[in-house]
Image (cartoon, rainbow, N blue to C red):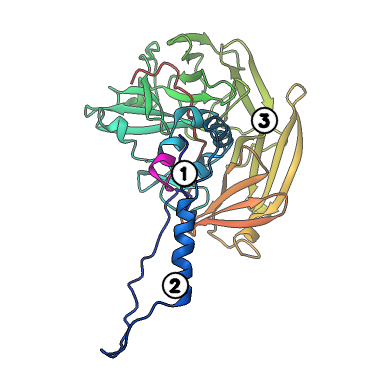
Amino acid sequence: MPPGGGGEEGDEHGSSTVQSHPPATVHREEDTPQLPTISAVASKEKKQKLEQQPVPSLPEGALVEILSRVPYRSLCRFKCVSKPWLALCSARDILKRSPQTLSGFFYKNAGVLKFRNLSGRGLPLVDPSLPFLRQRYENVHVEQLCEGLLLCSCWNSCSACENDYVVCNPATQEWTVLPPVVFPAQECSHPWKKGIPMTYLGFEFAVPSRFVVFATPYNADRLPGQMAIYSSETGQWSYVQSKWSSATHVDCSRRTHVFLNGTMHLATLCNSIIPTVDVEGKVWKEIQMPVDWASSNIVLTGQSQGRLYAWQLDYCDDSELDIWVLEDYGTGKWTLKHTVNVSELFGRHCRKDGDFYQMFAIHPDCNVIFLTNQKKMTVSYDMDNQKVHVICNEFMIGLPYIPCFAELPSAGH
């Protein structure tokens, strides 16, 4: 039977607050009889009449179809109605079909992983401590996030070199351990990172049955010639030779990447190109940036509505933010999407010395961007209606998170 019941909608986690008020204290004389009021009698009769009526309900199949079209954040609210609603809204079949969008951001504060809901309110939709991994590992370090999956480096010993790479789904608490990735011995400018590869996670909701991990030997100076690609479809690493030009220098320090249409897009030190490689390691490209940003230190990329975006914040021009979109992937044609003065978004008429701003993400489904500053404020900005919404009074460079309830490929736990 479908669940029944109702209640007032609470916060985005479905927690409703019901205030209980103590009965009013009535002072009366001992010889004064207490008579029920007409309104109280009518209210009691009405309540009894309603209780006698059957509770309207929908066929279970129709109710499931309706809830399968409800966003995850709304399902979280419905869970507080009753225990039957909690069970129904937690059903895996419904969650799998529920439309998902950006729900919040993973970020670090003082070295501790946290999660901030998109609205900026309420308890986190997911537990950022990842307790299901810590039951096995003493140390869990999040390396990458791609839509609904996390790539973590986990270990129990004192040395992080003796680690496992684990791909997990925080929404379902499923996880799988990757086999070791082994590169030939190489010279490394950072001895303590010798043997630790640089990893990049790729996952798309369009292909929920597959995730991939790209890895290169750690080298902060230039891109090494070899790349390893793990596919959940085979459960193995394949090793391919890089076909990018020798002048391509991947920026390993930023770990910026975009996985779009089955292709990994990385960042370079010179900010002039975006090197790409497909999941099979067969198609290698170098996309020219829209303008010469070689002298800029703040150039980032992202994806929204199936397109690649690049943005640059120019401190020399009073914090002007330029946002570009790649209109034609084949020809490499970029279009200037939007320009805005970031100082004004944070309530300043001009940038003062020492002010620091950063656009750290773009909404995957609409024309909304997310920015933060060192004055401990994070905001969203709608490029269509030019409205600013304060998310939190905290400095936050977050990783966009979209819940995923599909079964994790190669899930062994």
Kindly report which numbered mark, 1 or 3, lies closer to the viewer in this rendering: 1
Please tell me the numbered disc located at residue 86.
none
- Magenta span main SS: helix
Could you tell which of marks 1 and 3 lies nearer the N-terminus? 1
Q: Is residue 169 visible?
A: yes
Q: Amino acid at mark 1?
A: Gly
Q: Which residue is painted at 68% across and 25% down in the image?
A: 287
- Check the image and report above or below for 4 versus 91: below
Q: How far from the left and from the top, in percent, is residue 310?
A: 65, 37
The residue range painted magenta reads 76-86
- Using residue 42 as the reference point, say whether residue 363 is left or right of it: right
Q: Amino acid at mark 2?
A: Ala
Quarter occupied by the C terminus: top left
Which element carries disc 2, helix, strand or loop?
Answer: helix
Dot 1 alpha-carbon crowd within 10 angstroms: few under 14, some 14 to 19, many 20 or more? some
Q: Amino acid at mark 3?
A: Gly
What residue did someone put label 3 on? 306
Which element carries disc 3, helix, strand or loop?
Answer: loop
Please tell me the numbered disc located at residue 40.
2
Q: Is residue 121 visible?
A: no
What residue did someone put label 1 on? 4
